[in-house]
């Protein structure tokens, strides 16, 4: 499954993942391969990216997520730099 995370300033992540958890407005939810198509608003929170055995966390400032045909696109308003 392909994940793309972008902000108005720059691309943040673009690659293959096994799953991603996003901070949906109605609560966090996980997206796995072959997930049903969905569009959801996002709250401030953590995007948890899993690729095989590794995990990466990116803190975002709101946004929107779209899932369609094993492509997950997160349009974040911004990220919290570490």
Image (cartoon, rainbow, N blue to C red):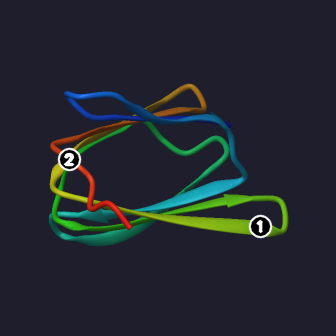
* Disc 1 target residue: 54
Q: Residue at x 48, y 41 (%)?
A: 36
Q: Residue at x 69, y 47 (%)?
A: 17
Q: Earlier in the sequence, mark 1 or mark 2?
A: 1
Q: What x and y, as percent, mark residue 13?
A: 52, 38
Q: Is residue 10 left or right of residue 47?
A: left
Q: What x and y, as percent, mark residue 67?
A: 43, 36
Q: Which mark is residue 8?
A: none
Q: Residue furthest front?
A: 82
Q: Is residue 8 left or right of residue 70?
A: left
Give the number of callouts. 2
Quarter location, residue 27: bottom left
- Foreground residue among 29 and 64: 64
Q: What x and y, as percent, mark residue 48?
A: 51, 66
Q: Residue at x 32, y 60 (%)?
A: 81
Q: Is residue 23 above or below residue 10?
A: below
Secondary structure at badge 1 equals strand
- Foreground residue among 34 and 15: 15
Q: Residue at x 84, y 68 (%)?
A: 53
Q: What x and y, as percent, mark residue 16?
A: 71, 37
Per the model, the C-alpha gap separating discs 1 and 2 is 24 Å
* Disc 2 target residue: 78
Quadrant where the image shows the N terminus: top right
Near mark 2 (Cα within 10 A), the count class, few <14, some 14-19 or many ≥20, is some
Quadrant where the image shows the C terminus: bottom left
Secondary structure at badge 2 equals loop
């Amino acid at each position: 499954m392909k994940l793309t995370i972008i902000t108005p300033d720059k691309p943040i992540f673009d690659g293959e993942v096994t799953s991603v958890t996003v901070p949906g407005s109605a609560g966090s939810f996980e997206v796995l391969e072959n997930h049903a198509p969905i569009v959801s608003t996002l709250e401030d929170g953590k995007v948890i990216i899993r690729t095989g055995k590794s995990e990466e966390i990116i803190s975002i400032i709101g946004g929107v997520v779209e899932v369609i045909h094993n492509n997950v696109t997160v349009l974040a308003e911004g990220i919290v730099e570490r």
